[in-house]
Image (spheres, helix red, strand yellow):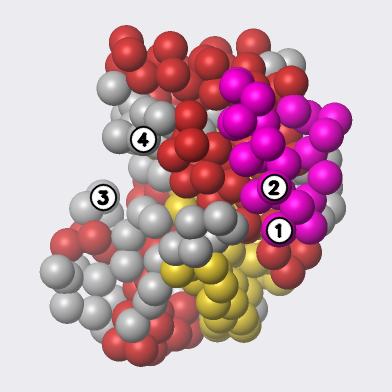
Amino acid sequence: MTPEGLALLRRAAAELSLDLSAQEGQFARLLELLQAGNQRLNLTALKTEEDIILKHFIDSLTTLRGGHLNGEWRTLDLGTGAGFPALPLALAQPKLSLVPLDSIRKKIDFVRETAQALGLSQVTPLVGRAETLGQSEEHRGQYDRVVARAVAALPVLAELALPLLRVGGLFVAQKGPISDEELNAGRRAAGEVGGRVVEVDEFNLPISGDARTLVVLEKQRPTPAKYPRREGVPTHQPLFWKAK
């Protein structure tokens, strides 16, 4: 990480009221590993140091707003891709037990290798789909927290995430600007699968000013057995929402 990149990381973290001084070396190493992995595997469209720091590292850490991830929570990262938000969260919140989930094996292999290189023993990457995990005894209702970053429309995310949560657990969905239509459909879908929207936090990403929204859902009761539906159905036939 260049001196300019380090200054950018510090400034953006300060805007989130985060002190990452103890983790700066690990974030620099993560940047290096991501750029090297990207050349081999085409993991992400973001390639410049500035974009990776702001739109991967800092954007991932905005999930810490509101304190919902403060604790020793078993947390699943739904659709982690190249490890976001899971890897930055593991650096900033080492008490979290993180399960980055993605259906693409090469991405999970990268996340696993990177977590090992960074000494993140609390990160356990997993290849799979939320529809399948949500119907498996090993994973259904077994997580304290679920996070997802710009993966799908809110009604889709509600159906995929809430079955994985224990009653009382929270789902933190990272979105850009969200329409009233999508939010209302998400509220209805959450109710259908056992939860409710408890917080809608609109803010701007540090430095860039890009609009962001954190939508927090609480699991209030067990999810009906028919949810989640089989692979692909939640995406192509979202609850209370016309697929785009």
Could you tell me residue 77's position as x and y percent?
Answer: 54, 45
**Of label 1 and label 4, which has the lower sequence position?**
1
Residue 231: give its label: 3
Magenta stretch prevailing secondary structure: helix
Q: How far, Cα to Cα, is label 1 from label 4? A: 22 Å
Q: Residue at x 71, y 58 (%)?
A: 16
Q: How far, Cα to Cα, is label 2 from label 1? A: 6 Å
- Mark 3 or 2: the one toward you: 2
| Residue designated by label 2 | 11
Q: How far, Cα to Cα, is label 3 from label 2? A: 42 Å
The quarter of the image holding the N terminus is top right
Query: Which region shows up in magenta?
Result: 1-24
Q: Is residue 17 magenta?
A: yes
| Residue designated by label 1 | 15
* Amino acid of disc 1: Glu
SS at mark 4?
A: loop
Does residue 135 appear left or right of residue 44 in this picture?
A: right
* Amino acid of disc 4: Leu
Query: In the rendered image, is residue 204 in sight?
Result: yes
Query: In the rendered image, is residue 134 in sight?
Result: no
Could you tell me residue 141's position as x and y percent?
Answer: 60, 57
**Of label 3 and label 2, which has the lower sequence position?**
2
Labels 4 & 2 near each other (Cβ < 8 A)? no
